[in-house]
Image (spheres, grey):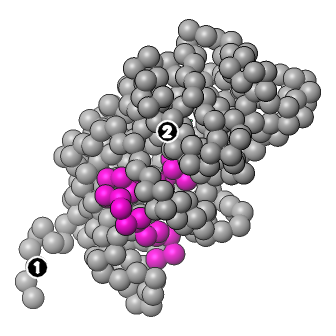
Amino acid sequence: METSEEETVARTYEVRTDGRPVIEKNRPVPAPAAGEVLVRVKASSLNARDLPIVSGRYSRPVPPGRVPLSDGAGIVEAVGAGVSRFRAGDRVTSSFHPSWLYGSLDGWDELYGVQLDGWLTEYIAVGEQSLVPVPEHLSFEEAATLPCAALTAWSALSGVGPGDTVLLQGSGGVSIFALQFARVAGARVLVTTSSAGKAQRLRALGASDVIDYAGTPEWGARVRQLTGGHGADLVVEIGGAGTIAQSITALAQGGRISLVGNLADGDGMDLTQFLNRGATLRTVTVGSRSDFERMNRVISRHRLRPVVDRVFPFAEAPDAFTYFATGTHFGKVVIRH
Ligand SMILES: NC(=O)c1ccc[n+]([C@@H]2O[C@H](COP(=O)([O-])OP(=O)(O)OC[C@H]3O[C@@H](n4cnc5c(N)ncnc54)[C@H](OP(=O)(O)O)[C@@H]3O)[C@@H](O)[C@H]2O)c1
């Protein structure tokens, strides 16, 4: 059988260190080994971690030529020997932690874009256990937003139910998913943002109150005021050191903080106030495949659609990184392959 070059070559982006985020290269289409699935990638999405990865500022070493992005969705093109979970034509997404199926995470040595080549490519071969079926009502562009941001939001909100008050920070990928999931769970949601335009969109998605964190540096007290002195039962902490002191002020007695990000510089937290609140701090590390599958059941049942800010064509992938770095996005930035 004759095969054209188009069928054997996968256009792929690699990290580089000369100022531009990524460079396009041709790589051979991988053959799926036993237990592996070859995915034709149709879309990928960016997360905050991808900026330090492509600019040499990530907390772990990234070898030159690494393919970035943890989040992708596509079609199963072929399966290796012994594969039983998928067959050609199935629609699948990546898992952020490819080997974390359930229970507790036991390591950080399998990260796409760091130790493993990631999803900013036309074809990838991965273990069948690492893939998750795409909810039927979602497009590839929408599905590609789920593996990191959506699952992190899902894990961060664990235990939230009707009557709870949740405080979210900003309008990025994790926070917008958290807003959608918290509303489905019946919680009241307050959100902080730096942008008046984004505030309107947050209200349209169901936020009861939006606070301008730049104009109201004491936004923790404002949350208590807006909740009649009760405070937030759960804060999804995106800012970290620079925001956690205000988050503690915002907390209800016995409240919880899900520690997700560290986007804001600052001095940290007042432990005495934290102890007086009887509060709990819980760290979040995205989630397992089993968490992902449970989340997808809720996404399907409620026909939830991810908020996609902008879709870039594959040929303009470097521009997607540049745009993402401006921080003007609302929800997710996606690349169509
Ligand atoms: N632990 C985990 O498992 C996990 C998983 C995913 C992400 N993360 C971390 O979570 C954070 C968010 O990730 P992402 O992908 O959602 O990022 P993103 O899409 O880039 O969102 C960033 C948003 O955060 C908001 N923000 C920045 N500084 C803020 C501050 N001082 N106060 C309130 N909001 C602030 C801004 O919202 P406005 O424009 O509205 O002001 C900004 O748009 C990152 O630190 C990321 O590394 C952790």
Tag shown at residue 247: none
Neighbour tally class for label 2: few under 14, some 14-19, many 20 plus, Cα within 10 Å: many
Image quadrant holding the C terminus, namely bottom left
Residue 67 x/y as whole percent: 37, 54
The range drawn in magenta is 128-151
* Residue type pointed to by label 1: Thr
The residue identified by callout 1 is 3
Element type at mark 2: helix
* 324 vs 209: above or below: below
Q: Give the mark toward the camera: 2 or 1.
A: 2
Residues at marks 2 and 1, CA–CA distance in whole angstroms: 44 Å
* 101 vs 302: above or below: below
What's the residue at 90%, 34% (across, down)?
A: 278
* Residue type pointed to by label 2: Ile
What's the residue at 47%, 30% (across, down)?
A: 202
What's the residue at 57%, 28% (across, down)?
A: 208
Residue 130 x/y as whole percent: 50, 70
The quadrant holding residue 242 is top right
Beta carbon of the mark 2 residue lies under 8 A of ligand 1 = yes
228 on left or right of 30: right
The quadrant holding residue 119 is bottom left
Q: Is residue 82 among what the camera can see?
A: yes
Which of 156/190 is in front? 190
What's the residue at 29%, 47% (across, down)?
A: 335
